[in-house]
Image (cartoon, helix red, strand yellow):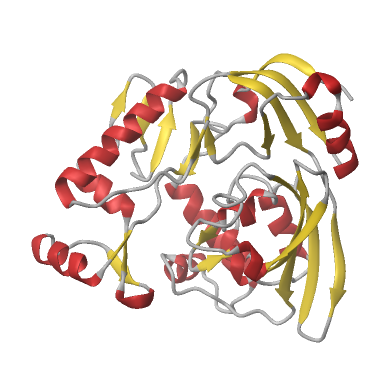
Amino acid sequence: MLISENVLLRPYNTFGITAHTRYFTSFSSAAALQEILSAPQQQGLPHMILGGGSNLLFTKDFDGIILKNEIKGITVVKEDDEHVYVKAGAGENWHGFVMDCIKHNRAGLENLSLIPGNVGASPMQNIGAYGVEIRDTFYELEAFNLEDFTTATFNNTECEFGYRESVFKRKYKGQFAILSVTFKLNKNPHFNIKYGAIEEELKRMGVHELSIQAISQAVINIRSSKLPDPAEIGNAGSFFKNPAIDGTTYDRLKAEFPHIVAYPVEDGHYKLAAGWLIEQCGWKGYREGDAGVHIRQALVLVNYGHASGEDIYRLSQQVLDSVHAKFGVDLEREVNIV
């Protein structure tokens, strides 16, 4: 068990923020994690499980121990005539896992190609893109209780998935480390190409026969054209959630802003495009020092080099305030703030 001190976290967060942690180590099994947490020198210290570092913003140094999840492995645990159940270690790279599923013609995750981060974060966030969310293919996960060192299994219902939500972001926040996630994937694909520009991109690609490989490539092309590569410009993807509003609020906004971008969801509510709201407030392409709003996607806040976490956070608050002032709508940060 190697525990390092005063570790720079810049390589471990996609925002590229220069922060430090008092202690840092990694684990590749539940047993290794238990050994670390049981060590006398770690008692009473704050701890944080770190995956791919793609959905967090460090606004200060971490005065505790960061535990990087390095649990790997992809295995088929069972299958039937229609489905194959694939288990992946929480430390597997998400896009790498999706590519492995596509390679073996296991359908269901192709719309989620090129999303940064690791497998373990996917159910925590209920990640989603282009009309698909994790809960659509999620079967179960194994999680390690950081308090009593027991392992529990959570099924789809028990995860209480919502829009970019699960029990691990609210009720059980900070209480579990996800060890593995099992997905129920399709042997016969059900294509989902109605959302966003997938159909248009498939036509541009000259695709005449749909396949999960073609859809994945279309999604990769679209994301690459719209979103900055964290290896080139520090970012955490979409910084804000798309807000949901009731029908009365929607009618008011539609009357005042006829071109507002929204789509109906359950119970007579509407989901607004947060990127559109932010763009209408004049933020798209804005830059102050090295903190900015991406020039092609207003949902994405970026670090052009040496912005601090506080710089990014302060900019996000300015965005929140301006959207509320113009539209009377409260945006919510999707990124976890540390």
Q: From this viewpoint, which residue is outermost toward the bottom?
A: 81
Front-lying residue, 25 or 43: 43
**Residue at image x 62%, y 65%?**
110
Residue 182 left/right relative to 267 = right
| Residue 284 seen in the figure | no
Task: Give the percent coordinates (x, y) of residue 213.
Answer: 65, 67
In the image shown, does 290 or 326 lie closer to the viewer?
Answer: 326
User: Is residue 34 found left or right of 68 in the rendered image?
Assistant: right
Residue 118 lies left or right of residue 235; in this view the side is: right
Residue at the farthest top position = 6
Quarter of the image where the N terminus is located: top right
Picture quarter containing residue 21? top right
x and y, in percent, of residue 59 in the image: 48, 24
Q: Residue at x 63, y 74 (%)?
A: 211
Residue 167, visible in the rendered structure? yes
Q: Nearer the viewer, residue 337 or 240?
A: 337
Instruction: Describe residue 164's horizontal placement relative to residue 34 as left or right.
Output: left
**Residue 33 placement (x, y as % from top left):** 83, 37
Counting every numbered tag in the picture gives: 0
Image point 83% across, 49% down: which residue? Answer: 150
Q: In the figure, 190 relative to 336: above or below?
A: below
Q: Estimate the x, y position of residue 253 in percent, counting from the top left.
A: 15, 62
